[in-house]
Image (tube, rainbow, N blue to C red):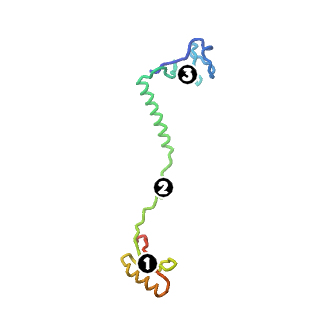
Amino acid sequence: MLRYVLLMAIAPEAAYRGPEPVAYGVEGILLHGRARRALDAGDGAHWPLPCLPMGRMSNRDRIARAAEEARLAAEEKAAKRATKKKPATPSARSAKPVRMKVVWEVRGGSGKAIKTFPYAEKAAGEAEAMALTRSTGHAHTLVATKVPMD
């Protein structure tokens, strides 16, 4: 159980020398801290007002305090979750990877593709590259290239 502390009933004027002005509660007892703020707020708090516990805290009080802190944390978390951003639209997701296939390209000296052959027809591609090299006098090469599947 929280101990109810209403600070110093003896000679209040001499006993309290703090930055806050002195406030008196029931029967002229000096108040400070939470009790003082409750009195100033006028929230109709019941007497005696609970202040910080003096001494050890019982397990029941410790469990009650932990439950209250957990409840407050859950409320804050729920409020944060309610103000979260909406997820990205499906169009913003990355595109599905496209399947690729390998083809043979005959290229001229500038690297421009002149003719394309399927992967299985490599011999025909080599023969075409040799024929173009002989006929034009410029080097032609056969290069494997990946292109999207149809």
Dividing the image into 4 quarters, which one contains the C terminus? Answer: bottom left
Residue placed furthest toward the left: 120
Question: Which residue is drawn at the image coordinates 49% and 86% (left, top)?
Answer: 137
Dividing the image into 4 quarters, which one contains the N terminus? Answer: top left
Question: Which residue is drawn at the image coordinates 41% and 74% (left, top)?
Answer: 103
Can you identify the residue that label 3 sits on? 35
- Which label is found at residue 3? none
Q: Position of residue 73 (x, y in %)?
A: 47, 35
- The three-letter code of the residue at mark 1 reads Leu
Question: Which residue is drawn at the image coordinates 60% and 17% (left, top)?
Answer: 16
Q: In front here: 147 or 21?
A: 147
Spatial separation of the CA atoms under disc 2 and disc 3 = 53 Å
Tell me which corner region of the image, top left, top right, bottom left or bottom right, holds residue 24: top right
Q: Residues within 10 Å of mark 1 (few under 14, many from 20)?
A: many
Spatial separation of the CA atoms under disc 3 and disc 1 = 91 Å
- Which label is found at residue 142? 1
Can you identify the residue that label 2 sits on? 89
SS label for mark 3: helix
Q: Are marks 2 and 3 in contact (CB under 8 Å)?
A: no
Q: Residues within 10 Å of mark 2 (few under 14, many from 20)?
A: few
